[in-house]
Image (tube, grey):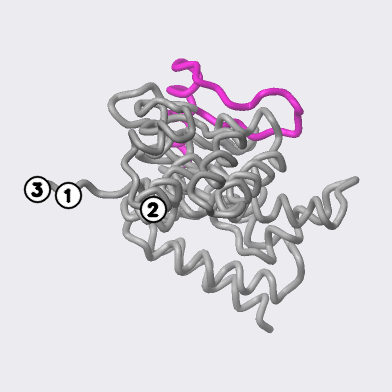
Amino acid sequence: MSVFPEPDPSASPRIRFGAELRKVRLLSGLSRRRLGDLIHTSVSHLNMIENGRRAPTLDLARRVDVVLGRDRELTDLLDRLNRAADQLPRWFRPWLDFEREAESLHVWQLSMVPGLFQTEDYARALIGNEPGVTEEQAEERLTARLERQNILNRTKPPMMWVVLDESILHRPVGGPEVMKNQFQHLLRLGERPHILLQMLPYGAYSTVGLLGSFVIAEMPRGGPPVAYIDSQSTEDRVSDRSEEAKALVCRHGVIRADALSRRESLGLIKETMRKWTT
């Protein structure tokens, strides 16, 4: 009999909830059809939720908890996932699915360590300085940001081509200890086989990326690339316009051509880290 792999729970909140729903259903000894009958939901609908292809509702989670006698287990899980998503700007939420589903990510970061690579203390220092953000809001946003990093620990993570500007190594965020730990984290990430980390040094005199940071997500099954364009604007910065994404792919290639090699880049991080430890 064929054994089908379970969905990777770290891939997205939908898949995470679906994997948990599947687990509690099997522990209760119920087929999808039987559970669907008990909660008045079709087998196909339940199948899509378990496989992360459809977003669950709190009402469905409550009905499953009641039928399976799970107290509020699934309801509380979904509530936590929803609250974490609510801490992200509305325009940014569509990007999360593109980021999670991407086969590869091309990153150019000008001003700070990208969110996927930030340590908890580095991220807390950045979020805590946002004007008007309460301590509770900051902690919820921090949780949401760290949740995104789960894609790096998947069984099959996306291939990442990351170029960071040298200024990131010299801009103080949270103090020397925070910076030192952040650099150590960058070095560990830079040694992973699926992450190609490069630094763009001041000496390159490169000006191509000065207009701002961006990320291009290359989607599976030949889907068109999608871009996230960073700026101080409050407008939508997620673009699926193929012309714009292709132009950014070209721009990323030019920036990479001016960057240090992988080995030289890790060496520059190590060298700069000494500044923060003396």
Please give the count of numbered marks on the rendered protein.
Answer: 3
* Residue 276 coordinates in the image, percent (x, y): 67, 76
What amino acid is labelled 1 in the image? Val
Q: Residue at x 64, y 56 (%)?
A: 168
Q: The disc labelled 2 sits on which kind of residue?
A: Ser
Dot 1 and dot 2 residues touching (CB under 8 Å): no
Q: Where is residue 60 in the image (x, y as percent from the top left)?
A: 55, 35
Where is mark 1, residue-wise?
3
* Residue 28 inside the magenta-drawn segment: no
Foreground tag (1 vs 2)? 2
Residue 210 appears in which quarter of the rendering?
top right
Looking at the rendering, the stretch of residues picked out in magenta corresponds to 227-255
- Identify residue for label 2: 28
Q: Identify residue for label 3.
A: 1
Between 195 and 84, the residue placed more toward the observer is 84
Instruction: Answer with left or right where residue 203 lies relative to residue 29.
Output: right
Q: Quadrant of the C terminus?
A: bottom right
**Residue depicted at x 66% and y 28%:** 91
Residue contact at pointers 3 and 1, CB within 8 angstroms:
yes
Q: Is residue 252 magenta?
A: yes
